[in-house]
Image (cartoon, rainbow, N blue to C red):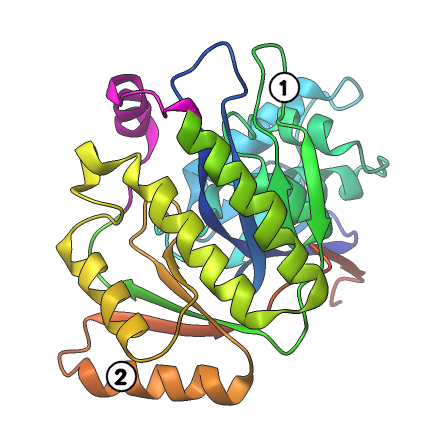
């Protein structure tokens, strides 16, 4: 194996609060708002090698991202590197793992080959991401609360509306059933093809909640207003998927979980993307720990995974170290 620097890329996870629109080809599609979290993140290592090698889980996804990047790179004729996935949450749980992993691969390969960091749309296009939502794409670069406008037909990536840093003390409690995954791939595309279009008045109401309530509350660190606005946005956005989910949340179990958490006094609760991850916004470590302890005490069968995470306001981190000799 060739000697050379070991490049580590650590990417945040993404929560998606909901979409603004779909099914209306004459207006912006998708769009929406979400936030980046420190945990559970994606971490991979890349270093020079005599051939192309992948170590760890999700090898097919890593290979696909790397080969896409290679095809887009005019100055790289052959991949000679070892890519190791050190850690990552499970796929299709609503945490945006696919996007973060692909962008981490592209970022690591750019660094390995001494290439400057490209604009965000170019980075996403190099590995085939940003086809619908761009929250995770912008969040990979900058972290924070991300609001994006949605795509017109000729947009490669949805334009960024605004990025806001969330207060450092706030916490997100993630609760996810250990079994079950959200819609993805061909099944997800087929579902979007069959869903009725989002009514114009619903998109207008969602846009109003996002622009006039969520973003201002984040800037002012108004925790109570932020919590209520995030819940209202997610409930209304989720109702657009009622024909598939059975309601604003993906099944009775998740709906019951949301209601139980809110009945306990936590107001900012929602489903990330298709789920099955449910998130709760807490004002401090103490309140997040109290909620987690309460949920654990009710989960006698150990059916849920719980994670407490701080907001990520910096985006992905890239570090370089010398190989051990």
Query: Which residue does the image show at 54% across and 49% down from the upper left?
Result: 34
Tell me which corner region of the image, top left, top right, bottom left or bottom right, holds residue 186: top left
- On screen, 40 above or below 105? below
Q: Give the number of callouts.
A: 2
The residue that label 1 is drawn on is 156
Query: Which residue does the image show at 29% across and 54% down from the upper left?
Result: 276
* Residue 203: % across, % down: 46, 31
Asked if the residues shown at circle 1 and circle 2 are in contact, with their CB atoms under 8 angstroms apart, the answer is no
Tell me which corner region of the image, top left, top right, bottom left or bottom right, holds residue 255: bottom left
Q: Is residue 253 left or right of 188 when viewed as pictured?
A: left
- Closest to the observer: 291 or 125? 291
Q: Is residue 136 left or right of 324 when viewed as pictured?
A: left
Q: Is residue 283 left or right of 4 when viewed as pictured?
A: left
* Residue 141: % across, % down: 71, 46
Q: Quadrant of the C terminus?
A: bottom right
Report whether residue 101 is seen. Answer: no
* Residue 147: % across, % down: 62, 42
| Mark 2 neighbour density, 10 Å: few (under 14) some (14–19) many (20 or more) | some
Under circle 2, the secondary element is: helix
- On screen, 284 above or below 271? below
- Closest to the observer: 228 or 133? 228
- Closest to the observer: 277 or 78? 277
Query: Which residue does the image show at 47% across and 85% down from the upper left?
Result: 287
Report whether residue 108 is seen. Answer: yes
Query: Which residue does the image show at 42% across and 73% down from the upper left?
Result: 307
Q: Which mark is residue 296?
A: 2
Q: Is residue 122 magenta?
A: no
- Closest to the observer: 111 or 299? 299
Span highlighted in magenta in the image:
182-200
Under circle 1, the secondary element is: loop
Q: Give the Cα distance between marks 1 and 2.
A: 43 Å
């Amino acid at each position: 194996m060739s000697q050379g620097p070991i490049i580590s890329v650590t990417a945040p996870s993404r929560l998606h609060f909901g979409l603004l629109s779909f099914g209306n080809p004459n207006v912006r599609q998708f769009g929406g708002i979400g936030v980046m979290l420190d945990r559970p993140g994606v971490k991979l290592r890349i270093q020079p090698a005599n051939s192309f090698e992948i170590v760890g889980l999700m090898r097919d996804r890593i290979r696909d991202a790397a080969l896409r990047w290679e095809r887009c790179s005019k100055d790289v004729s052959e991949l000679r590197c070892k890519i190791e996935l050190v850690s990552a949450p499970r796929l299709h749980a609503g945490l945006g793992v696919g996007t973060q992993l692909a962008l981490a691969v592209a970022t690591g390969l750019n660094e390995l080959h001494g290439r400057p960091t490209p604009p965000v749309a170019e980075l996403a296009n190099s590995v085939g991401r940003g086809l619908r939502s761009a929250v995770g794409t912008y969040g990979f670069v900058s972290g924070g609360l991300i609001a994006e406008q949605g795509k017109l037909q000729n947009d490669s990536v949805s334009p960024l509306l605004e990025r806001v840093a969330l207060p450092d003390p706030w916490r997100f409690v993630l609760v996810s059933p250990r079994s079950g995954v959200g819609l993805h791939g061909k099944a997800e595309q087929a579902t979007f093809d069959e869903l009725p279009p989002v009514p114009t008045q619903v998109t207008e109401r969602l846009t109003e909640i996002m622009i006039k309530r969520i973003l201002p509350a984040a800037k002012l660190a108004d925790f109570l207003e932020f919590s209520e606005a995030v819940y209202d946005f997610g409930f209304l956005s989720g109702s657009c998927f009622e024909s598939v989910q059975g309601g604003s949340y993906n099944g009775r179990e998740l709906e019951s979980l949301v209601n139980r958490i809110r009945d306990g006094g936590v107001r900012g609760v929602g489903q990330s993307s298709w789920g099955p991850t449910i998130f709760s916004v807490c004002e401090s470590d103490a309140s997040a720990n109290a909620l987690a302890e309460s949920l654990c005490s009710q989960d006698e069968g150990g059916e849920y995974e719980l994670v407490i995470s701080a907001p990520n306001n910096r985006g992905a981190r890239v570090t370089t170290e010398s190989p051990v000799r």
